[in-house]
Image (cartoon, grey):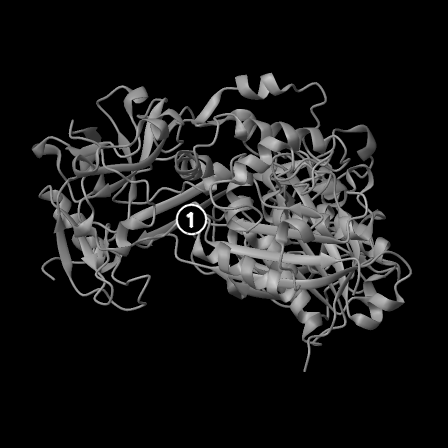
Amino acid sequence: MAKERTAVIGVGQTKYASTRGDVSMAGLLREAAQRALDSAHKTWSDIDAVVMGKAPDFFEGVMMPEIYLAEALGCVGKPIMRVHTAGSVGGSTACVAASMVQSRVHSTVLTIAWEKQSESNAMWALSLPQPFTTSVNAGAGGYFSPIMRRYMAMSNAPELIGCLVAFKDRQQALKNPYAHLHQPDLTFEQVVESPMLWDPIRYSETCPSSDGACAMVLTDEAGGDAHDGPVAWVAGTAMRSESNSYGGRNMVSPAASEQCADDVFAQAGIHDRRAEIDAVEMYVPFSWYEPMWLESLGFAEKGKGWQLVESGATKLEGGDLPVNCSGGVLSSNAIGASGMIRFAEAALQVMGEAGEHQVDGARTAFGHAYGGGAQYFAMWIVAKDK
Amino acid sequence: MPEEVLQAPLVLEYPFTRTTGPVVGRFLTGLRERVVLGVKRADGTVMCPPLEYDPANASALDEMVEVGQSGVVVSWSWGGPRREQQPFDQPVAWALIQLDGTDTPMLHAVLVGGPEQMSTGMRVQIKWREEREGHITDICGFVPESDETGPKASATVDLDSVEAVESVRTPIRLNYSYTPGRALSEYLYAMKDKRIIGDRCGDTGQVFVPPRGVSPVAGKATTGMVDLPDVGYVESFNITRVPIAARPDLQPPYCSAWIVLDGASVGFMGLVINCELESVRLGMRVRAVWKPDEELGISATNILGWEPTGEPDEVIADIERIGRVGAQQTRRGAERGGVDSQQRGAL
């Protein structure tokens, strides 16, 4: 029996900000969830189940927050489930929510992901002490920067490709009212001259630390057909994971990433990835991950991803493969939500609802998330047509 | 295995901030002013402590009403001996207390001498803390209503005219007993003798360091320990200008690198030291810098870092070469002519 066709009929986001001191964690989620319900023309009683995700509990210090959040999300008396795949969790959560509809377990599902980073310090949570040894690298930047240096060496990419990505995403964020970083006066030279934090990664090539939540309402084929408003049809979802250390592991383009991409593109019947995808929202927390993922995901040949960046192909203005028109993770990073924001922004593009950062005529869009030591992957493809 | 599996205490603590939002913030502001507030639901019932959203129908709640400071014990259990992290200086009963004018009970402590003084249905009243800050601990606990507890709160304070509570500090401390397990324990004991050991996957021949007991490629237990030299090369690196909270001794900038030992199939992170940071490069040969013998312990910290050996660089252009062909086949840079100049120029 074929899967139930699944539609995104509602998207809701909060404004991303370094501190949302005006709302509790429940209030933050509620804001995104209510906006998703409103855009789906649904009420709490229309929701059959809630699937939620966030990064590890240490990021805020609330153990199992999904339990405390049940009332705020109208979950009392309904199934509630939390997905947990580190930084990719927002994407995985959307995939699990979609599977609830695709499998006909539920008709209409609310899915939501969030982080309230201001309540803690992610760098602390990522660098917990361990007896018998000591820390030798600082946070995610300390872990990923050597991998980016490997890519730079392997591809012979010009040194400032990363700065081009960072500048592009910050420019595009100006068109997204929800983006955390709005830096209208930022110049490319300022990106280049910003201090090296994890050489070869500059301050301006790293993501901010944000509070925020993102939610979507997914429904079945009948619900999608009946919806009085724009719809994004789910054309494929895939998840893969791998060990973060084994002999022969390609840390620049992990096997799990390539396999996950092959799976999701095959589901959507896409053969020429660059030509057939109109908008890409991928997880780029550090600038160089744009060309790295372009290659790993098959949008560019190995070693050539940086050429797409350099040519402007990934820009909203004039590019044929616009990447992170929303400003991406480099402009808003509510960690647990970041993957779902990618998925939701892909949906907004094919719904024609992306506002100032809309890609004209977008019919097929790609959403992507990764997490852990680049070891968890979640992807989906959404389309304007069923 | 000759030695015991290691174990050590591990304490994780952090002073988290909790943003209260308007409803809980108002409740906590009230406590600071010795006023107890509940929240009214659409059906007229009152919940205390207040919730932001109605558990029955998910509607947002914001109508705060003052409730009584005495109430009835709905249920209780004796808390047993006082525990260190509890904010009480005596043993307590944990009780569900329904305050007058509310429809839901609040969990709090009843401060009595023993369980024989507790009963379901007994009336209790709040004992306020002298110094209040807008926190649930502003209530010391509850005492039997007949006891002397000082003046009851005046409800005359205007909560709109006082500073609102918007966030609370919630320091958290977790005490773990950490064990690195058998494989890593063996590795740590070997460190005391300035030896580095890894373990081998019986199916693929891959060698993991530090050893992990299970092969991530075969999914089976590893088949034995392997002694590795304390020399290898830099697979990649960064130069970090960000401090590490747990390493006040480590002043930025410093070089964090993936080090691949000769004979190992995987790299691990270490610090490159005793050289100019600008001279660190992919493929640079390095050796371990050990602590002085008299300072050696059962610890990975015995290796202070990794310093250049001065040997010709390793050729590592083919990233998937490592491990796939087995570590012993890795060819030394001297045989290949070193990292080509164009590649180095890109760095």
Q: Quadrant of residue B118?
A: bottom right
Q: Nearer the viewer, residue B246 or A358?
A: A358
Residue A381 % position (x, y):
67, 58
| Residue toward you, A141 or B119 | A141
Tag 1 secondary structure: strand
- Give the residue drawn at x 74%, y 56%: A216
State left or right for residue A121 relative to residue B194.
Answer: right
Q: Which residue lies furthest to the right in this view?
A: A228
**To which quarter of the image does residue A144 belong?**
top left
One can see residue B121 in this view: no
Give residue A101's position: percent from left, percent from top.
71, 71
- In the picture of the structure, the residue carrying the numbered disc 1 is B174
Q: Answer whether residue A118 is visible to the viewer in this image.
A: yes
Q: Is residue A141 left or right of residue A219?
A: left
Q: Residues within 10 Å of mark 1 (few under 14, many from 20)?
A: few
Question: In front here: A230 or B71?
Answer: A230
Give the left or right position of residue B147, taking residue B13 as reference.
right
Chain letter for mark 1: B
Q: Which amino acid does label 1 sit on?
A: Leu
**Residue located farthest toward the bottom when viewing the structure as drawn:** A1
Horizontal side of B297 relative to A61 (left or right) equals left
On-image quarter of the C terminus of chain A: bottom right
